[in-house]
Image (cartoon, rainbow, N blue to C red):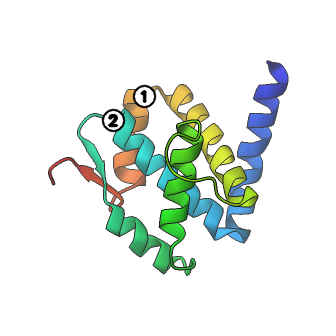
Amino acid sequence: MRYGLLIAGLLLIAAPAQADDHPRSTYVTLVLQAFAAKVECPGTDVAYQDLVQKAEQMHLPQGTTEKVRKAIAWMHTGGKMGEKQDDDLMAEVAVATQATDLNQRRLGMPNWCEAQKTNLAGLIRAKGG
């Protein structure tokens, strides 16, 4: 158990330094958090087209949003939905999942959901909005 927490902590420490060198990792985390907010935060929906636009602003290749969405779906449904993507992308999804899970537990879900309204402004919205 201690080793799991140590590894998660090291991943969190390494993630910000790596994020500058790997904009896709940063983007994967944004997409994962947006979909997590949709699932975990009542009344929240994903602004998918805004995720696509964000990928373009970050100069990521066309189709990145869909690849990331499929990778997240595949990982979070045990392969029942989405599609497995290349190993690097799957690893980025795994790191983003661990970091998000740790952050949710640290803040508590209500506080995490509230924080996402600011952190993901423009990428998530109120349902029906």
Dot 2 corresponds to which residue?
Answer: 41
Amino acid residing under circle 2: Cys
Residue at point 37%, 37% (across, down): 39
Q: Is residue 72 left or right of residue 113?
A: right
Q: CA distance from mark 1 to mark 2?
A: 8 Å
Amino acid residing under circle 1: Met
Figure label count: 2
Residue 92 position within the rendered picture, expressed as x and y whole percent measured from the top left: 68, 54
Q: Are marks 1 and 2 in contact (CB under 8 Å)?
A: yes
Residue at point 20%, 47% (across, down): 127
Q: Residues within 10 Å of mark 2 (few under 14, many from 20)?
A: some
With respect to residue 61, does 122 lie above or below? above
Q: Earlier in the sequence, mark 1 or mark 2?
A: 2
Which label sits on residue 109? 1
Residue 115 position within the rendered picture, expressed as x and y whole percent measured from the top left: 40, 42
Secondary element at tag 1: helix
Please tell me in which quadrant of the rendered image residue 5 appears: top right
